[in-house]
Image (cartoon, grey):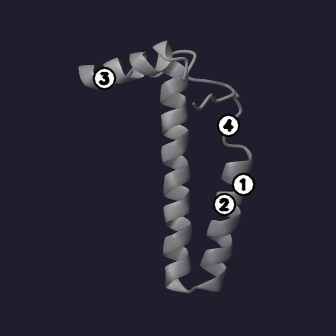
Amino acid sequence: MATTPVQVRIPREMVKGLDRWVEEGRFANRSEAVKTIVALYNERERVRDFYEARMSRDPDRIAQRFVALHRQRRGQFETEVIYK
């Protein structure tokens, strides 16, 4: 997967948390931690979209959201993610 450098500013306490996770071996580095967090947030949003479609009881919308959720989960992590 091609990557694009992105500069972000986050609160110092969040950086300390990222560094702690890296020290504990949960992630190889800050970049891997941030990529994983963004991927998990994207999955959460797709799941939310699916359930909103489900609650609408529109069969076409449900099917579209289900397929999108399934495709996203199949290709979500192209890098190895370590969870402890």
Q: Pointer 4: what residue? A: 77
CB-based contact (under 8 Å), mark 1 and mark 2: yes
Residue sitting at x 66%, y 60%: 68
Query: Residue 63: which disc?
Result: none
Q: Which residue is mark 1?
A: 71
Q: Position of residue 57 (x, y in %)?
A: 55, 86
Q: CA distance from mark 3 to mark 2?
A: 31 Å
Sequence-wise, which precedes: disc 3 or disc 2? 3
Going by the numbered disc 3, the residue's amino acid type is: Arg
SS at mark 4 in the image: loop
In this view, the mark in front (1 or 4): 4
Q: Residue at x 49, y 56 (%)?
A: 45
Q: Nearer the viewer, mark 4 or mark 3?
A: 4
Q: Which mark is drawn over residue 68?
A: 2
Disc sitting over residue 9 in the figure: 3
The Cα–Cα distance between marks 4 and 2, rounded to whole angstroms, is: 15 Å
SS for callout 1 = helix
* Residue 44 appears in the picture as rendered: yes
